[in-house]
Each structure stands twice: as C-alpha cells, then as structure tokens.
Amino acid sequence: MSIDHHHAALAQRLTVLSGPSGVGKGSVKALIQEYYPWVWLSVSCTTRKPRPGEVDGADYHFVSTEQFESMIAAGEFLEWASYAGNLYGTPRGPVEERLRAGLPALLEIELQGARQVRRAMPDAQLVFLAPPSWDELVRRLTGRGTEDAATIARRLDAARGELDAEAEFDHTVTNVSIEQAASELVELLSSPAVLKTGAR
C-alpha cells in the first residue's frame, strides 16, 4: 500500500480531500465533476451498498468483500481502509498513470486512507473539508435518511475523532456551501505547486 519514493516529485500534483463523515465530501466532488471537467477525480472501490442515485463506476466501484480482499492481495490499491463496517480503497493504476503523465489528480477518501497517502507520498497536498459547526454536521448526518440509527451513531462517534485530525492537513476548506467549497478546492488544485502547465 505504498508508492515508490522515486515518484515523490509527482506527488506534488496529487491532492487528497478528506474530512469527517457527513461533511459533504461527495457533494463537493460531484459539483467539481459537473463544473470543472478538467479536474480528474479518482473513483474509489467500496463494499458498502449504493445509496439512492449513486451510479456504479461514476460515484464508486461497488464490489463484494471477496472482490475487495482479492484486490488487496494483488496490491491493486494505493490506499484502503475499513470505515463504519465497510471497506473503501483507491485503485492504484489510474492514479499512477495520471501522475506519470504529469497531470494533477484529486482523491476524495476517508481519513485512514489520507494518512496512508501522506506516509507513501509526503509531498501530496492534503485538504481537510470541515463543517461550519458540530451541530451542522450532526444535522447533515441524521438528515440523510439513508442509514439506520446504529450506523449514524457509529459515524458520529468517528466524526468526533476525525475533526481532531484537522491539524494533520495542509489546508482546511470549510463547507459553508458546496459551491464555495468546490471553488476553494479547485483554486488549491490550480496552485503553482500542484499545476505547473495550466488547466487541462
């Protein structure tokens, strides 16, 4: 679950977006896909069930636990993590291909995965998506209507610890509105240290 260190220079073009469950990472990612088509976003694999409206291959690659474990054994993940009873992972091949081409890449992943990327690629840019307040995060998590009470409780417990991880990140974007957060993230993606040849 690591990348050869001679790829370290390419990591300057890798941006990782993470933050607590319910903060709106997926919504920000979807808006970027719609309005900033030059931004390349990795599609993660997960063993969780699709939520209403999610499309296999676009939002996630939805796989079985057996498939996921086979991919781990084959070394096919850049990072992977267990979260709220499900497995999540970033397929290695598409990301490395993008970086070898000298182009920026954006990963939207859980905190455990962001830490793995930090260890493997210390020059990667890590961005923490924060809620405006704890009360707002609770409202977003409980208002989804897609998960049972036990799952929500697990996510709230995890979110408390995840908020404490903000100091580990290079930048913080507060998700007051999806549009503002997406704009700030794209600006970070377009910074000279990340994007050296202009928007694609």
Image (cartoon, rainbow, N blue to C red):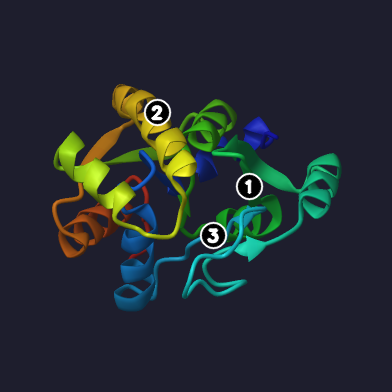
Asked if the residues shown at circle 3 and circle 2 are in contact, with their CB atoms under 8 angstroms apart, the answer is: no
- Binning the other alpha carbons within 10 Å of mark 1 as few (below 14), some (14 to 19) or many (20 upward) gives many
Q: CA distance from mark 2 to mark 1?
A: 22 Å
SS under mark 3: loop
Residue 77 shown left or right of residue 150 in the figure: right
Please, what is the three-letter code of the amino acid marked with disc 3? Answer: Ser
Please state if 149 lies on the left or on the right of 86 as rendered.
Answer: left
Horizontal relation, residue 147 to residue 56: left or right: left
Amino acid type indicated by mark 2? Asp
Image x and y of residue 146, in percent = 44, 60
Q: Is residue 72 left or right of residue 183?
A: right
Mark 2: which secondary structure? helix
Q: Nearer the viewer, mark 2 or mark 1?
A: 2
Circles 2 and 1 in contact, beta carbons < 8 Å: no
> At x 55% / y 26%, what residue is drawn?
119
105 and 50: which is toward the camera: 50
Residue at x 48%, y 71% (from the top left corner)? 52
Kindly report the distance in space between the C-alpha atoms of the residues bearing marks 3 and 2. Answer: 27 Å
Name the quarter where the N terminus is drawn.
top right
Can the viewer see residue 43? yes
Looking at the rendered image, the quarter that the C terminus falls into is: bottom left
Badge nearest the viewer, 3 or 1: 1
Q: CA distance from mark 3 to mark 1?
A: 10 Å
Amino acid, disc 1: Gly
* Disc 3 and disc 1 in contact, CB within 8 angstroms: no
* Residue 157 - label: 2
Q: Which mark is residue 89?
A: 1
The image's mark for residue 42 is 3
Q: Secondary structure at mark 1?
A: strand
Indicate which disc, 3 or 1, sits on the residue closer to the N terminus.
Answer: 3
Query: Residue 100 bears which disc, if any?
Result: none
Q: In which quarter of the view is residue 99 placed?
A: bottom right
